[in-house]
Image (cartoon, rainbow, N blue to C red):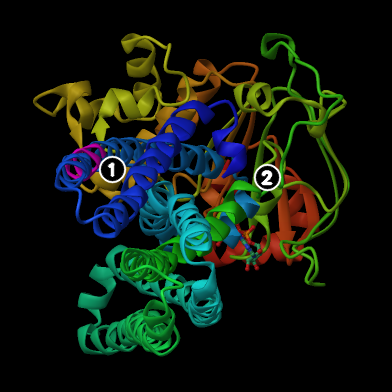
Amino acid sequence: MMGIYRGHWRPIAISQIFALLYVTFMIFIPMQVMIIINDAQNIHAAIQNAVLIALFAVITGIFCMANTVYAVRIAEATGNFVRNGIFARIQSFSFGNLDRSATGELLTRLTSDVYQINIGVQLALRCLLMAPFAILVSLVLVGITSPELLWILIVVIILSIATFGYAMNVMQKQFRTRQEKYDLVNNDLQENMAGIRVVKAFVRQDYENKKYLAINDGFRKANVNPLHTNAITLPSALFIMGLATTLLVIFGAPLVSAGTVKIGAMLAFFQYTFIIVAQMWQLSMLMPQIVSAEASAGRLKEIWDTVPDIQDAKTARHYPPEKVEGRIVFENVNFRYDPKGDAETLKNINLTIEPGQTVAFLGANGSGKSTLVSMIPRFYDASSGRVMIDGVDVKEIPQETLRNIVSVALQKAFLFSGTIVENIRFGRPDSSYDEAKAAAQVADADGFVSAQPDRYDARVARKGQNFSGGQQQRLSMARAFTVKPKILILDDSTSAVDVETEGRILDALPKFLSGVTRLIVASRVSTALAADKIVVLDRGEIVAVGTHKELIRSSPLYQDIFDSQLGGLKKEDVS
Ligand SMILES: Nc1ncnc2c1ncn2[C@@H]1O[C@H](COP(=O)(O)OP(=O)(O)OP(=O)(O)O)[C@@H](O)[C@H]1O
Ligand SMILES: [Mg+2]
């Protein structure tokens, strides 16, 4: 929090000055009462003092209000700042970071945890400095007016600290658990919402209901625990107050009889004891909230402090994308998703792709095709070995430049809510309407887009739900084309596109993106046939590289794939 407020101390200081003024005026009221009672014969002075008390009360109210207004504003500003900051941090996450964080969890942190901080800051600004100050000044005043009884207040304070401190300690752990359980609730909700159609298709509503019920119940219990702990604080405060009164009567009354302590001082003492216990209790009421905010701050700090796996190297320098030729070299690349595990997803990859070549990647599901191509735009970094573009290690190219050089249509097409043209221009917002249209024509999307009443301004629903799977893929390819990259990667992005349309797209591509190196991950052999080079992958290793003609003779795995898909064709038909 200190880091957040650096350079913004003024409003905080002002809020605290108001708080201290508020307490100061509040605390002098019992002193006035004491003066009136000790000097009861002097009616004139008594009236003067009574007016003063009323005035103090009004001033107290005004300062209290000013403090609250400031506290609320600072708390809202803090919440806002933290939310923006966390959002920006999440945007900087690399694919690896995202793999490791659940969406629901990030959601809880952005909403509930930020809210906890908001409330915590507000209450802290209202009480954290004020309560101890009130207690301290009360102690000093009692020390001056009736030093013989001071020890009773010290007993009260020690007891309060012990009780409330213990409760706070327990609650801190309980609040952390509560937020963790809340994560589980949100994660489940998020996943269920994403997969609700699958749930319906398999009639698994009951199962999902039961699962959610159990998770939600865990949350309920975790929510109750800190409240239970908090429930001991009020009775404790009352008990301490009662104890103080008892001690005061036993030890104070003889002193009053003996005339050592005046009756007015005794009354003031009562009021100060009340102020101290009330402040202690208030602190204990606020502490759960502050402690909860602290637990939330810890969770947010985890995101705040997360270092993106992929960062620009210090030595990275800008390469003008227009000067890039697009030669790609994989040199002894090995990769594992889990750096601590020993499962290698890519093993000893050596591959050279010349500028302007079209290279297809074939292989069974899970053979590592997507992983391999994702090393080029640095979605993931090789565990060992190097990936180079025009002889420069991709780590030496700033990510921003790299993503202008390499454009990807991801395996899972995703459209944002908005308009079609906004989606197509997503990678190059400065591109023109006509450029977007030209890209859509190549992706064979112009036909169905033009059939929409609003054409390129037609609305895209959330997650592109109002378009078919194949249409979504075509729009997502148009988005990749619009970037006008030097290297284009299509990761199985025609899997839902019918073969005829796919043929048209692949035919139109070379003209639209001439000289661009094209990497096409394919699950259909037909997609790969026209490539200059076909790379066959098996369990993370390259097992064959060559043209169709070469592979059909030399690679048994390629023959298998070919026969299983196009076995009915005569070999000479293929050309
Ligand atoms: N984000 C990830 N975290 C951990 N493991 C992953 C991740 N993505 C993929 N894998 C694993 O890496 C292996 C290769 O996956 P990859 O997605 O590269 O396969 P693929 O050849 O593209 O398959 P498909 O044809 O199904 O698209 C798989 O065994 C998979 O389990
Ligand atoms: Mg894949």
Question: Within 8 Å: ligand 1 and the Cβ of disc 1?
Answer: no
Q: Is residue 397 visible?
A: yes
Q: Residues within 10 Å of mark 1 (few under 14, many from 20)?
A: many
Q: Is residue 191 visible?
A: no
193, above or below 224, in the image: above
Q: Which of 353/139 is in front?
A: 139
Quarter-of-image position of residue 155:
bottom right
Query: Is the magenta region chiefly helix, strand or loop?
Result: helix
Q: Which residues are magenta?
A: 53-59
In the drawing, what numbered circle is on residue 279? none
Mark 1 falls on what kind of element?
Answer: helix
* Residue at which label 1 appears: 64
Left or right of residue 352: residue 84: left
Mark 2 falls on what kind of element?
Answer: loop
Q: If the picture is divided into quarters, which one holds ligand 1? A: bottom right
Q: Residue at x 37, y 84 (%)?
A: 253
Quote the CA–CA distance across marks 1 and 2: 44 Å
Q: Position of residue 407 (x, y in %)?
A: 57, 30
Left or right of residue 547: residue 347: right
Task: Tell me the kind of residue under disc 2.
Answer: Pro
Label whose residue precedes the other's in the sequence (1 or 2): 1
241, above or below 368, in the image: below
Q: From this viewpoint, which residue is outermost toward the left?
A: 453
* Residue at which label 2 appears: 308
**Foreground label between 1 and 2:** 1
- Quarter of the rendering occupied by the N terminus: top right
Q: Residue at x 71, y 49 (%)?
A: 372
